[in-house]
Image (spheres, coloured by chain):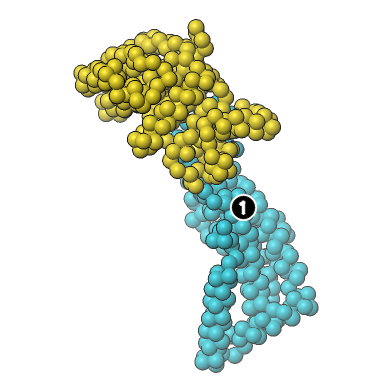
Amino acid sequence: MSAGALTLSKVGVTFPTREEGPLTALDGVDLMIEGGEVIALIGPNGCGKSTLLRVIAGLLTPASGAASLDGSPIAGPDARVGLVFQEPRLLPWRTSADNITYPLELDGWSAERRAARLAELVDLVRLDASAVTARPSELSGGTRQRVALARALALSPEVLLLDEPFSALDAMTRERFDLELLRLWDGAETTIVMVTHSIPEAVLVADRVIVMSPRPGRIAAEIAVDLPRPRTLAQMETSAATATMARIRAQLELAA
Amino acid sequence: MTQDRLVTRSSVLTVIGALVVFLLIWRAIVFIGGYPPFILPTPEAVFGRFLKAIGDGTIWPHFITTLQEVAFGFAVGAGAGVAIGYLLARSALVERLASPYLVAAQAVPILAIAPLLALWFGPGLLGKVVICSLIVFFPVAISTMVGIRSVDPRLLELGRSLRATRRQVLTTLEVPAALPSILGGMRVGVTLAVVGAVVGEWAGADRGLGVLINLARGSLFDIPLMFAALLTLALMGIVLYLAVVLVERRLVGVR
């Protein structure tokens, strides 16, 4: 088993609310993710997709059940896990370069090591040279998310978590980013867990699509995507892909 | 990036134009009203007295004294303001304990407690530094509190996901994010510091621009000299204000 395996057993999360008592965001979620697997989490609003991602990221401690990474319990944010938020979430006063190396700086890397790693990362996510020294306000939405991706990859994580990372981009740009993400994955065999609202995006990137249902958040179905890799946009037109999309759609309708 | 510069050709022309209009109106009021120099001297008389007072060294020791009071007072007041403002933003307990006193202290005019402070801290530098720092403290503390509170919680979550220590959160997230607000408070504070120094000098001092104003109005009865001292205070305020603006441009820059 390669590194980056995640195990969730009977994970439950409740949030206190003022009016209606505790709200169950996740209830008895069991999920095994192998190292290097690509998982898409899909479901209607309020099904706990983002909550599940935050449990894996160590930002949220489950009220019941357990989450573990490579066999050891997740006790908090971990260097082996990289996180890309829905919005780029860059520090507006820093250049792209300083945003990308921010995790390294917090981790105490020397300036020389940071510069060397920055060059690798800029190369990896194919960031334009002119964008490296620019501040976020000078960049397009897509380029900002590219910077955020480089930042998430800075510490070479085993697990990359993405919370609807390309949802603010137009459809064409989003497909390009999905394919680039797969190219990155091909090189590093990182475990990827991506939250998405888009069925085609889920089928394009994932080995397995997890359909979740709301109130309380539960896993409604797991659908394997049997398409060969490397994935291409042309594959999305095949009958296998359309059949998978139809199954996901049917499960989503049941779940909602 | 010409538009980011503090001094551009058109801004200089605007400032000079406004100054010329101001001086013309002043001159016209003296001319039309027929005021004697001991009520309202002409701008050229004031400027002449100003140059003479600089030339013969009348203003210099007073200027240095006031500048020292302002500098130390601002440093102490702004430093304490940033520290307390941070605690107010981050600790509900500190806010509940301290804010009534802060607001009460702010509601009492500094002019009214200046004699008391002069009594406690003596007629020297210390008393003025205390008054200056009290007057600087409030705007800086409030702007720091507002700035720290308005730090985007999503950035703090990012810091948490990257396992930033408390200190790293402070230096890499909170302070840079709150800096524009903090420096905005310091802009207000630095001009108030000049006011504080003069108030302190009036409550008891033997040197300083506030003292010079009193001397010029009273025993010397040299009203142009009083205006020259006022001009010096105004220039000091403008230069200090611009200094804070420059620091702001340097630190905050383009975002």
Colour cyan, chain: B
Side of B161 relative to A234 (left or right)? right
Between residues B253 and A205, which one lies in front from this camera angle?
A: A205
At label 1, counting other C-alpha atoms closer than 10 Å, the crowd grade (few under 14, some 14-19, many 20 or more) is few
B120 left or right, relative to A23: right
What residue is rendered at 54% in x and 54% in y? B184
Q: Amino acid at mark 1?
A: Arg
Residue at 57 percent of width and 50 percent of height: B252
Q: Residue at x 38, y 31 (%)?
A: A175
Whether residue A70 is visible, yes or no, is yes
B186 above or below A220?
Answer: below
Question: Which residue is nearer to you in this view: B202 or A95?
Answer: A95
Q: Residue furthest right?
A: B56
Look at the image and tell me whether residue B148 can be seen.
Answer: no
The foreground one among B100 and B233 is B233
Q: Secondary structure at mark 1?
A: helix
Query: In the rendering, at what x and y percent does residue B21 appear?
Result: 53, 81
Which image quarter holds the C terminus of chain A? top left
Pinpoint the chain carrying mark 1.
B
> Which hue is chain A drawn in?
yellow
x, y percent for residue B52: 74, 81
Q: Residue at x 49, y 51 (%)?
A: B104
**Residue B32 left/right relative to A7:** right
Q: From the viewer's perspective, is residue A11 above or below residue A117?
A: above
Q: Is residue A32 above or below residue A184?
A: above
Of A87 and A177, the residue lying toward us: A177
Mark 1 — residue?
B250
Image coords of residue A61 (percent x, y): 43, 19
Rendering coords of residue A7 (x, y %): 43, 10
